[in-house]
Image (spheres, rainbow, N blue to C red):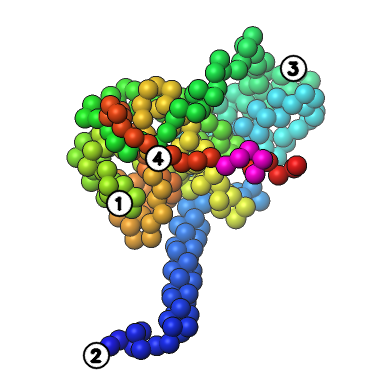
Amino acid sequence: MPSLNKLAPRALRRFIKRVKVHQDVRREFAADRRRYAASMLPDDRAIGLSLSGMNLEAQITKDYHRIEKGLALKEPRRPFGLEVQKRLERLLPMADPTAPYVQHAQSALAALQEWNTGGGVAEEISPVRQLASDPALPDPASFFGTRHSVRDFSTRAVEPDVLERAVALALNSPSVCNRQSWRIYFRHGEEARQTLTFQNGSAGFRDIVPAVAVISVDARAFAGAKERNQGWIDGGIFAMSFVWALHALGLDSCMLNMSVPTPKAEALRRHLNAEDSELIIMMVAIGYGRGGHRRARSPRREVSTVIMDH
């Protein structure tokens, strides 16, 4: 017996499909909202005495970086940062005094107090930038124009120390208030192939991928409704920096989206033993291209179609 869906007029079937799509969108946004609301840092107006873990680190980092930015201005106000000072004095005793971010905050706080009482700018906190005689790359078109997504890898293994160097380079990426919420998981060989099964676009070549990186950010680093999208921004910036770093070190890669429904993303978190607060940004397949491998043509837009002030 034919299903009711097949018996329904075409217009009704299209309507039913649209309704299902909208239901899917609402369900996914609701899941994102629950995760962010459970993880987020309160905004400055609601900071109390109950912060801990990554929330505490993020707030302290945000505040000490405000001092660094203020002292890097051409003409810093005097005094400035009094609310920041009060908040840091309240929050620092809650944190591990041996943690690097606490030590950064203590030195920034001392620099703020020195400035506000008539002293100069502390060189440690806002150092004078040393400019190279020629900061430009010798041939930027060669560097940027020779990086392509690779889907045909050789059997050569990817050295963990090279991946660590790439991460060290990518850590120079900017992030909101220097909070650096990034996480990266590496898997090699068969573990890489198992991890790639949680991604929808790599089925045609996942069996030959030597290594994979999963990049995430910790939502506990972001504050209030205004920063609800910041994790995706910071995570995307770091992911691109990491891929450029791989290119600079002679590795090939393919950036792989994580456009999957919530249950699949949850399964990946369990597979990685990741925190519930982590937002999965993307995967990156990594290796060395096989000799004679091909790449997708991937035409680029004309510059004139991107610059909007003509």
For image coordinates 47% across by 83% down, the residue present is 11
- Could you classify mark 3 by the number of other residues whose Cα lies within 10 Å: few (under 14), some (14-19), or many (20 or more)? few
SS class of the residue under badge 2? loop
Of the image marks 1 and 2, the number of the one nearer the N terminus:
2
Q: Are marks 4 and 1 in contact (CB under 8 Å)?
A: no
Q: Which mark is residue 120?
A: 3
Rendered residue at 34%/35% (across/down): 294
The boundaries of the magenta stretch are 301-305
Q: Of callouts 4 and 1, which one flags the residue occurring earlier in the amino acid sequence? A: 1
Residue 271, position as x, y percentages in the image: 27, 49
Q: CA distance from mark 1 to mark 3?
A: 54 Å
Amino acid under label 1? Phe
Quickly name the residue at label 4: 296
Disc 2 residue type (three-letter):
Met
Picture disc at residue 198: 1
Residue nearer the viewer, 126 or 175: 175
Location of mark 2 (residue): 1
Q: Amino acid at mark 4?
A: Ala
**Is disc 1 surrounded by few (<14), some (14 to 19) or many (20+) residues within 10 Å?**
some
Question: Along the polypeptide, which appears first: circle 4 or circle 3?
Answer: 3
> Which disc, if any, is residue 231?
none
Does dot 1 land on a helix, a strand or a loop?
Answer: loop
Q: Is residue 232 visible?
A: yes
Crowding near the residue tagged with mark 2, few <14, some 14–19, many ≥20 C-alpha atoms within 10 Å: few
Q: Looking at the image, is mark 2 or mark 4 nearer the viewer?
A: 4
Q: Secondary structure at mark 3?
A: loop
Q: Residues within 10 Å of mark 4 (few under 14, many from 20)?
A: few
Distance, label 4 to label 1, CA atoms, is 23 Å
Residue 130 higher or lower than 112, as above or below: above
Task: Give x and y (percent) for residue 43.
Answer: 61, 50
